[in-house]
Amino acid sequence: MCECIFCEISAGRLSSVILYQDDTVVAFKDANPMAPIHVLIIPRHHYESIKDIPEALIGHLFAVANRVAAELKIESFRYVINTGSQAGQTVFHLHLHLLGGRCMGWPPG
Ligand code: AMP
Ligand code: ZN
């Protein structure tokens, strides 16, 4: 078994609630949601962080996130990409958090 849980989800070997998938990107519900809506959008390919992803894929990742947000009918939401352990990254397979469904303060803690 691959050591990366998001590679396992992408390959369908680890269960998750998938909201969208295509050849290059998968969107699924966060297992430990921090908001009523908490979706993770990942590239299928393993890139450790946003620093490693090809430029063309960045656009598609956000396009998928926008599409999921539209399908969930949320107008206010937040995108978060934690990069590096000091910034809170715990899974080192690039993922875009889509958070919504509650009031969120700014700046974050
Ligand atoms: P980060 O701290 O930015 O690396 O975010 C990692 C996120 O992955 C956290 O919000 C976790 O709740 C989430 N997570 C970890 N394991 C799983 C899993 N098996 N399925 C869905 N989400 C997960
Ligand atoms: Zn991975």
Image (cartoon, rainbow, N blue to C red):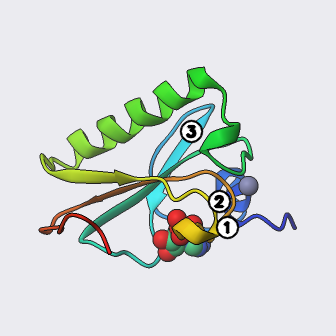
- Which mark, by number, is residue 9? 2
The percent coordinates of residue 19 (x first, y second) are 41, 51
- Residue labelled 1 has its Cβ within 8 Å of some atom of ligand 1: yes
Viewer-side label of 1, 3: 3
Say which residue label 3 marks. Answer: 25
- Which mark, by number, is residue 14? 1
Of mark 2 and mark 1, the one earlier in the sequence is 2
Residues at marks 2 and 1 touching, judged by CB atoms closer than 8 Å: yes
Residue nearest the observer in this picture, 98 or 90 = 90
The amino acid pointed to by label 3 is: Val
Q: Is residue 66 visible?
A: yes
Alpha carbon separation for disc pair 3 and 2: 11 Å
> Label 1 neighbourhood size at 10 Å, few (<14), some (14-19), many (20+)?
few
The amino acid pointed to by label 2 is: Ile
Q: Label 1's element?
A: loop
At horizontal 58% and vertical 56% (from top left) the residue drawn is 83
